Image: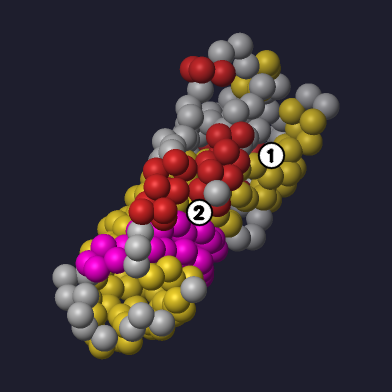
Amino acid sequence: MLLGVLLLVSACTTSSPYNRGSLSDAMEKAKDDYPEEREVPNERDRRSRKEKDQPSQTPMDEAASIASNSGGNIFLSARGGNAFYSSPYFDSLLDAEILLSFREGRAEAGLFGGFKSVTAKSGSSIEESVDGGVIILRAGIEGRFYPFPELNFFSPYILGQAGGIYMYWSFKNPLQAGADTITSDSVGGMMLGVGAGVNVIDTDFFRVGAVCIPETHLFHSETQEGFQNDVFDYYGTVRWAVEVGFSL
């Protein structure tokens, strides 16, 4: 359900009835030292809705099937951490997620949802255009493989993730588009991650461990306010997190 909601939001935030030019032009006009009027185009977008980007969706029926076919333990886990590496637009401040998963033997599958808090890299053009931090909401499907499921201590695993994202920011200065004043914008997209972790304690009732996940975020070509996204292409991190889970 969480994945479906976020993918729906992601789709809505990249469909605008306006064509307001490029995002790079909007970012330039939002800077404090921009010398002219902060006006952007306000034309109606004549492209059909089918021609616009749509997020890559994973059917919720598949997720439900994973859950219903699992005869193992159901875990509710929380994890949080930061990033060893973050490039090219932002420095990572914090990320946190909730994971509901279904484990049987060596395999585990589930749904995750959470957020990543980032800030524009110091001295970058984006820092001059964006007011404060940037929030990325994420939700998706995660799968794990445990090569030694019999281990109750220091049990390693590998994982893969795929999901939808929604990135929100505020402009440093408002923009004028006809009668509209634009103070913020957002863009949807998708994320992919592959990582490895270890559960220091791994029982049928409780687990605690750490994980490292290299991941990338891919952004749609249009923002919610109708700007053509020529600023954000992909954003990658190598993050670490501590995870605690309980069997339901």
Please tell me the numbered disc located at residue 138.
2
In magenta, the rendered stretch is 90-118
Q: Residue at x 41, y 63 (%)?
A: 101
Q: Quadrant of residue 70?
A: bottom left
Q: Position of residue 60 (x, y in %)?
A: 46, 42
Report the colour scheme. secondary structure
Please tell me the numbered disc located at residue 35.
1
For marks 1 and 2, the one nearer the N-term is 1
Q: Residue at x 76, y 32 (%)?
A: 176
Please tell me the numbered disc located at residue 187.
none
Q: Position of residue 98 (x, y in %)?
A: 51, 66
Q: Residue at x 46, y 35 (%)?
A: 55
Q: Is residue 232 magenta?
A: no
- Identity of the residue furthest to the right in this view: 179
Distance (Cα) linking label 1 and label 2 = 37 Å
Q: Is residue 161 visible?
A: yes
Q: Amino acid at mark 1?
A: Pro
In the image: residue 118, left or right of residue 178: left
The nearer-to-camera label among 1 and 2 is 2
Q: Is residue 111 magenta?
A: yes
Instruction: Judge by depth and name the residue closer to the eye, 223 or 140.
Output: 140
Q: Label 1: how many residues lie within 10 Å, few (<14), some (14-19) or many (20+)?
A: few
Secondary structure mostly seen in the magenta stretch: strand
Q: Position of residue 224 (x, y in %)?
A: 62, 35
Q: Label 2: how many residues lie within 10 Å, few (<14), some (14-19) or many (20+)?
A: many
Q: Amino acid at mark 2?
A: Arg
In the image: residue 198, left or right of residue 52: left
Contact (CB < 8 A) between labels 1 and 2?
Answer: no
Above or below for 86 versus 241: above
Q: Position of residue 83 (x, y in %)?
A: 39, 69
Q: Is residue 79 visible?
A: no
Above or below for 71 versus 30: below
